[in-house]
Image: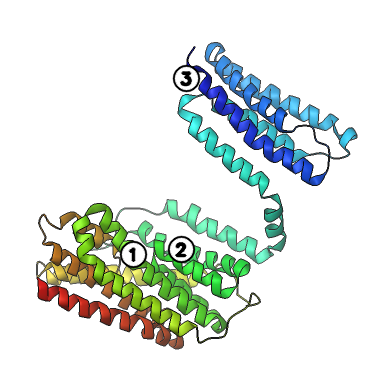
Amino acid sequence: MDFADIYPFLIALLIGALIGTERQRRLVEDKVRGVAGLRTFVLIALLGSLCSALAVHFGSGFAIASMATFTILVAVGYASSTNTLGRVDFTAAVAAVVTFALGMLSGFPDSILLAVALAIITTWVLATRTITHRYVEALSETDLLDTLKMGIIALVIYPLLPEAPLGPWGVLNPRQIWLFVVMVSLIGYAGYIAIRILGAERGLGLTGILGGLVSSTAVTSSMAAEVKENRQILPSAVFATAIASCTMFPRILLIVLVVNRDLFFALLPNLLIMTIVGAALAYMLVRKNEPLGKDVKVKDPFRIIPALKFGAFFAFVLIISKLANVYFGDAGIYATGIVSGLADVDAIALTMASLAGLTVDTAVAAATICLAAITNTLVKLCIAYVLGTREFGNKMALIFLPTTAAGLVLLLLLWAAI
């Protein structure tokens, strides 16, 4: 016998100890008697691992019979304990069956990491009882229905859409366009939840930072829709949009750093200055406003119309980008950067990072990425005006225009060095 033979059983013991510790802590916290505590859950996980090992010799039918037998045993045990405890701890019964199943899963070498991950998630679900109960109790009927709508557009409609490009130029990919609709809706929903928990200022600020890591354009569209519905959150929406846009620049740098270190250092001054200018202007503009409390009233978290408008706008930009490519032809790589920036920055950043130093000069690649970032920032300014209010657009212009101006000045210096 070597360590490899006993390793699955040790993992099962750790899984049982993890879940059992939470169950034991819950019994102590509630000051009640329970059927199973730490030691029992450790033994349950070990039993599952032993059944898994025996199933190797006796076949899969043994594993199925073991699972069924243990489930019946737990059901009978917890049902008979009702008279003693005066209550039915159904959560503990289900946790016992899950622990047994995870113990069995840990017996398979290819599933050990999955078993550990599921054990951690299970313990987290059990440990957050108070938080989840409080959150569910605070949910309104509208919140629940909007959550279901969010699930429909993300998990039902999205997989059904064709992924093949459509249209005369083959640039309209329904699934890709709908993905942006999902992102706008999801960012708006996450912002609503963050506002409910943290208040308008901190909630939307966090939404801007996290949303900017995914798509600053989607954040701009979502915030524009929020402002149109509720002018009270204008300062926080402006800050969230600006921060999301500023987050785009470090995101580009990270993409470039992973692929091409030389291009990263060539690009660093330009995008760093644009980040600092944008963040500083956002802070200066927002700090003059009175702080908002947690009592800011926000309407329904799910609004599909603004998301669909953004989807239509994104499709329009894709068509314009294709037409520009057709008319520009091989006029230059800079035109490619401008056209790419109309829709997305990550793609051109990854492309230039792959080509820089090989078929494209590093300075030229850096200038192309800067052009794409500047173009994308101006596109977001257009979104602020078109999908939001004039006041929102004017506020964003005070941030986006100086940011793009700083980028253009640095770009001219970069061109002068080429």
Q: Identify which residue, 390 or 237, lies in the foreground.
A: 237
Residue at 41% in and 66% down: 212
Tell me the quarter of the picture where residue 299 sits: bottom right
Q: Residues within 10 Å of mark 2 (few under 14, many from 20)?
A: some
How many numbered callouts? 3
Q: Is residue 282 visible?
A: yes
Q: Quadrant of the C terminus?
A: bottom left
The amino acid at mark 1 is Pro
Residue at 35% in and 75% down: 276
CB-based contact (under 8 Å), mark 2 and mark 1: no
User: Of the numbered discs in the image, which one, if any, rests on residue 210?
Assistant: 2
User: Of the numbered discs in the image, which one, if any, rests on residue 4?
Assistant: 3
Indicate whether 162 appears above or below 298: above
33 sits left or right of 350 in the view = right
Indicate whether 143 appears above or below 73: below
| Residue beneath disc 1 | 250
The amino acid at mark 2 is Leu
144 sits left or right of 156 in the view = right
Q: Identify which residue, 273 or 196, lies in the foreground.
A: 273
Q: Alpha carbon of mark 3 to alpha carbon of mark 1: how far?
A: 44 Å
Mark in front: 3 vs 2: 3
Could you say whether the residue bearing mark 2 is in a helix, strand or loop? Answer: helix
Indicate whether 365 appears above or below 320: above
